[in-house]
Image: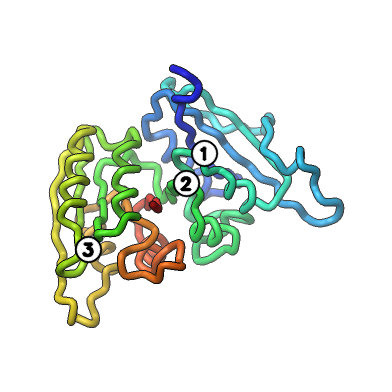
Amino acid sequence: MAESDVRVLVFGDDGSQGADVAWLWVNEQPWPNWRIEVVSVEPHQGGRPPSEAEASLRPWDPPVPRRYFGDDVAEVAHLTATADPRAVLGRRGDASLIVIGPRGRGFFKSLRLGSAAEWLLQCPPAPLLIARSGRPMRRVLVTIDGSAHAWRAAQVVAGLPLLAGAEVTVLTVGYAGAPVSDDVAGAVELCQGVGAAVDVIEMTPDPLELFYNVRDTVLDVAAEREADLIVMGTRGTSEWPTLRIGSTASAVTRYAQASVLLAHA
């Protein structure tokens, strides 16, 4: 396989318990021929600004390296830098997936809300997965609302080596008349094409139902289906176009018991 064909998983590591959970999640999934980059950033504490070399990711040998126990990956590399962690991960648009834990210290401090983690959540440079358990992905909930972001999220999860043998529920959360039919059919085809068993739940509330809450619908269905992973676009069809992440995706990310995968078009 050519080096250009190797896909990259960036794992944000701050040594916290949340990072330990996220690393267990990485270990429980197959990553055939992927390169896993364990990124540990030392925030700049003031004084002399770090040089360009210090602020750039570079290989290092941590005292306790992360071990990947499978034999299918192309490489596990440990990288570090001395810089603002937001700037370091914000430049990782080359990654196929960025994985972080739900709670941490420093950079990944609580998604309810640590400033740097909130920044990454608002402006993910690549598909972002917040891992809340180390379970393999057996049950997956893919939300479709007619937005380009939701369709992109479906494409991303189908392109990851996670869905073979999984049970996938495609949930439509658009309002009546929203252009979701083609996206639902496309998401079903994508997931079935990689070996998942797929069913569809359609939720099309009356547009005049003022108190309908998409967030609660997603969380309720995820709980009922015992989902291991919720897949969403960062912004739906009804959100302000200037926002990078919509209120529904933001709320689901904070309150879901399952891991969450976010992607944007």
Q: Earlier in the sequence, mark 1 or mark 3?
A: 1
Contact flag, marks 2 and 1 (Cβ < 8 Å): yes
**Looking at the image, can residue 262 be seen?**
no
Contact flag, marks 2 and 3 (Cβ < 8 Å): no
Residue depth check, mark 1 versus mark 3: number of the one nearer the observer: 1
**Looking at the image, can residue 129 be seen?**
yes
Looking at numbered disc 1 in the image, what kind of residue is underneath it?
Asp
Q: Circle 3 sits on which residue?
A: 173
Q: Circle 2 sits on which residue?
A: 126
Looking at numbered disc 2 in the image, what kind of residue is underneath it?
Ala
Q: Earlier in the sequence, mark 2 or mark 3?
A: 2
Q: Which mark is residue 160?
A: none
Q: Circle 1 sits on which residue?
A: 94
Few, some or many residues within 10 Å of mark 2 (<14, 14–19, 20+) = many
Q: Is residue 91 left or right of residue 219?
A: right
Few, some or many residues within 10 Å of mark 3 (<14, 14–19, 20+) = many
Looking at numbered disc 3 in the image, what kind of residue is underneath it?
Val
- Which residue is found at the position 58% from the left and 29% from the top? 77
Instruction: Quote the CA–CA distance across marks 1 and 3.
Output: 30 Å
Contact flag, marks 1 and 3 (Cβ < 8 Å): no
Give the secondary structure at mark 3: loop
- Which residue is found at the position 29% from the left and 59% from the top? 147
Instruction: Quote the CA–CA distance across marks 2 and 3.
Output: 24 Å
Instruction: Quote the CA–CA distance across marks 2 and 1.
Output: 7 Å
From the viewer's side, name the closer residue of 130 and 17.
Answer: 130
